[in-house]
Amino acid sequence: MFFNFCTRMILKSKLTASIAIILFTSVISGAEINGRFVVTNSDSSKIAVLMQINTVTGTYGIGGATIVFGFDTSAINIISDPVRNTDYIFHNFSDNNYSPATITRPMKGRIWVNIDLPFNNSNNGTIVSDTSGWTDVVTIYFDITDANGLASINWLSTSPFWGIYDDDNLTLLEPNLFQNLTYTYDITPPQLVSASLLDSVNLEVEFSETVDSTTALNISNYSIDNGINILGIQKSTNQNKLIINTTAHTFGHQYTITVNNVADLSGNLISANHNAAEYTIPPSDADDEKIPTEFILSQNYPNPFNPSTVIRYQLPVTSQISIKVYDILGNEVATLVDEFKPAGSYEVEFNTSTSAGDLASGVYVYRLQTAPSAGSGRAFTETKKMVLLR
């Protein structure tokens, strides 16, 4: 465990235990780390809170760390001596090159997340995601003490015991954006808000809130009339939406999808009064643009450019796609697209004055990556260069 007054302390289980102090010189750098809490599940007695972190660059691993946060004991609580794999489960930074990570509650309303990468394993820690993603640390299971209260959890990065080090065990990562959590227990059942076709075989459904993956991805919980069969389901990037892969719909027909036994993250089942939605696929138009037959990423235009350029691309099937821009060293500078797209032809603008900050003149790379929609089995990656001239 590490402390930001440049002293490493090894605590033996409780505050009253003996403390060994090892002095060393830490390197305080410009490396920044972010954190957040996510409620992954709750019921009448328990609430599961996932702690996640990321760094600005995504080049840092985690070495030794003591991460401190507080919680409102009037709404939630945890036993004084939390049990591993019962009261908490680590997803990273525990075992293998690390010592077994622990959660301790040194005092009422305080939690310490204790991570240790032994010095003989320095530089062999787990790399943390950059700001485009999150790395899971630990899920903590709190007891609910007041179902009508607010479950509030707040980071205590100014605590004298706080310290998160790079996996060289010397470089202190500076706290940047840490999002506190205020959560109201959910007793409202989810509702099916809408259904709309992305193309003849992919249906997007939207719920009033994020739904539980186990129930939401169960094909047997859905039915569509007029002979439509469901082949597969996956979550969209928007967590309250699903993409349902089906057999082919008929242009001009009206359909109804009905949902049963799908729950939200609090275990509330969808209401029978709001579990169906109607949708249609409009008649085909003779002048409709033809669906592309292959993936295509076109050269940006204009090129060279200043300050903006347009990138065109084509998709022969509905896909989850991303278009990202990188500098010549491979650092990501912008995400232009990250969503599900129906088959078709598209274009997106890369404007350096709005989407990527103040970029210098030089060569940049843009990359299209696709993942197949359920059942399509097709994916594609292509990269092209472009030149910014200031």
Image: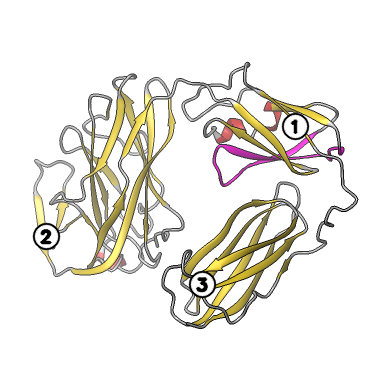
Where is residue 290, by image quadrant?
A: bottom right
- The tag earlier along the polypeptide, 2 or 1, is 2
Measure the C-alpha gap from mark 2 to mark 1.
61 Å
Q: Which residue position holds label 2?
A: 5
Query: What residue is rendered at 63% in x and 57% in y?
Result: 321
What is the secondary structure assignment of the residue under circle 2? loop
Measure the C-alpha gap from mark 1 to mark 3.
40 Å
Q: Which residues are magenta?
A: 229-251
Does residue 310 appear left or right of residue 283 in this picture? Answer: left
Where is residue 201, by image quadrant?
A: top right
Query: What residue is rendered at 67% in x and 27% in y?
Result: 221
- The tag earlier along the polypeptide, 1 or 3, is 1
Q: Residues within 10 Å of mark 2 (few under 14, many from 20)?
A: few
Where is residue 225, by image quadrant?
A: top right
Q: Look at the picture and state if 122 lies above or below 129.
A: below
Q: Visible in this render: residue 259?
A: no
Q: Residues within 10 Å of mark 1 (few under 14, many from 20)?
A: some
Label number found at residue 298: none
Q: Look at the picture and state if 344 lies above or below 111.
A: below
Label number found at residue 326: 3
What is the secondary structure assignment of the residue under circle 3? strand
Measure the C-alpha gap from mark 3 to mark 2.
37 Å
Q: Which residue position holds label 1?
A: 279
